[in-house]
Image (tube, rainbow, N blue to C red):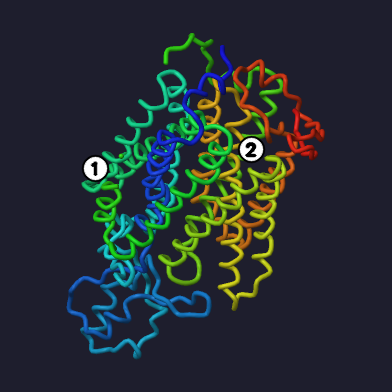
Amino acid sequence: MKDYEETTAFLGTWGPFQKMVFILLCTSTIPNGFSAFSVIFLADIPPHHCRIPDSNLSDAWRNASIPLQQVEGKLERVKCSRYSLDVIRNFSSLGFMPHDVNLTDIMTESCADGWVYSKDIYQSTIVSEFDLVCNNNWKQPFTSSIYFLGVLCGSFFSGQLSDRFGRKPVLFTTMMVQTFFTFIQVFSPSWEVFSILFFVVGLGQISNYVAAFVLGAELFSGSVRVLYTALGVGLFFAIGYMMLPLIAFYIRDWRMLLVAMSVPGQTCQPNDKNNIWDLVRTRNIRHTTLILFLVWMTLSMGYFGLSLNTSRLHGSPFLNCFISAAIEVPAYVLGWLSLRCGPRRLACSASMLLGGGVLYFIQLVPADLPALSTAFEMLGKFGMAIGTALMFVYTGEIYPTVLRNTAVGSCAMVSRIGSAVAPYFIHLSIFYKSLPHMILGSLCVLSAVSTLFLPETFRRPLPETIQHMQKRQIVTECVCLPDSAGKTIPKFRC
């Protein structure tokens, strides 16, 4: 097989063709920013309480028919029960008023007539549409998990399909799948149908993202490749992410929000056929793959866990989501600069230490300073975003051309185990408020240390074959070599 850089040299480095492809590939990731976090608004839980049907009840008894409970020092209506309507009707018919009886002695019953949902924030979500509360409250986080399971399956199949049939066919096909099934979701008659379609949307979303990422990484060279993989793709993804809360702020109905989201679409010698098992076939490659699996899963759990948690933070859910999206822009810029100037391993390790380390401090914040807790959580998201962007680039540089799409797809697939668990992971705060942050911080520290055992790729050509990759040692040797100006520069050799 010819040297990859020589084979693609005829394309040039930064001409009109590269500029056009750069913009088109980056633009293709904007809808992914919508799709990946749409569940924040599609499945948010509005304030709700039991519905009290029209009956022979006075206004006073109707207002008193829902028990009260104290939540963080405030009295709120209970969400999943009401006082027995038969008993209340009897008191009302006898002329008693709520203050004449001890309401706590009245037995309660479930919400047999459904729920009333507040429309202060949303006109409707899938939670209010399909009553995903109380006994069905497990369906709300499971909706996110189903989406990420689709992403997991898409990561598994798209990588191998791209290596077999090419990047472009997979890219365009999966973009159409994502757009079409997002639109079809609008007509979902039930939560089950919505979830099945959401699974397919997730499958298409990650497939076209990985295909676009790898296609650009192989078309571009040198500093343009680093610019595209570290900044271009992530920045346009963040633009889509930032547009989501802005659109959701003006479109408060989940069906119309989905409509808005669906609008934004040389002959060479044959190589040896490779498959996913080559990622674990030999000791060195297996060692690298397992470390990357751990790191990707941790980053995904943290990135999506903190992103999905924005609606639970203090303040407006729309503003919190926008800040969470906007903070990715400087994160990607910093990631790009670190890739241009320094070793990959240290940059990845430092970003995870930042993202996980600040989460430990959240438990030390006083309860009367919720804004400070939000700031720490956003700083943690900042570190996770840097690490996620770096790992896409780093993983693509570690593996050879014949395995690159399969490797990136497989790592993305394993990472979706973390993102599928993330909706339930943030619910661990029920047992202890800081438990999710403590566990996630510990995983980040472990992953940061593990990253130091990966091969260095800074200023190294992309490997072309499995044999080329196997020659790299786990421990990196750093030597200083003179550049064209006579100065010594660090040269990392694995």
Instruction: State the SS at label 1.
Output: helix
Tell me which amino acid carries mark 2: Leu
Q: What element carries label 2?
A: helix
Furthest residue in direction front, as rendered: 485
Instruction: Determine the CA span between mark 1 and mark 2.
Output: 35 Å
What is the x, y in percent for residue 270?
Answer: 48, 9
At 28% from the left and 62% from the top, the residue drawn is 251
**Label 1 amino acid?**
Ile
- In the image, taking residue 103 as reference, residue 464 lies left or right, namely right
Quadrant that contains the N terminus: top right
The answer to whether the residue labelled 1 contacts the one labelled 2, judged by CB atoms less than 8 Å apart, is no
Q: Which of 359 and 88 is in front in this view?
A: 359
- Identify residue for label 1: 184
- Quadrant containing the C terminus is top right
Please provide percent x and percent y for residue 361: 68, 64
**Residue 47 % position (x, y):** 37, 69
Q: In this view, does 463 lie above or below 268?
A: below
| x 34%, y 55%: residue | 42
Horizontal relation, residue 15 to residue 410: left or right: left
Between residue 363 and residue 488, name the one nearer to us.
488
Q: Report which quarter residue 112 is drawn in.
A: bottom left
In-image side of 106 versus 466 (left or right): left
Crowding at mark 1 (Cα within 10 Å: few <14, some 14-19, many 20+)? some
Where residue 453 sits: x, y (%)? 75, 35
Q: In the picture shown, does residue 458 fall above or below 326? A: above
* Residue at which label 2 appears: 294
Mark number displayed over residue 309: none
Q: Which of marks 1 and 2 is nearer the N terminus?
A: 1
**Crowding at label 2, few (<14), some or many (≥20) Cα neighbours within 10 Å?**
many
Q: How many labels does the image show?
A: 2
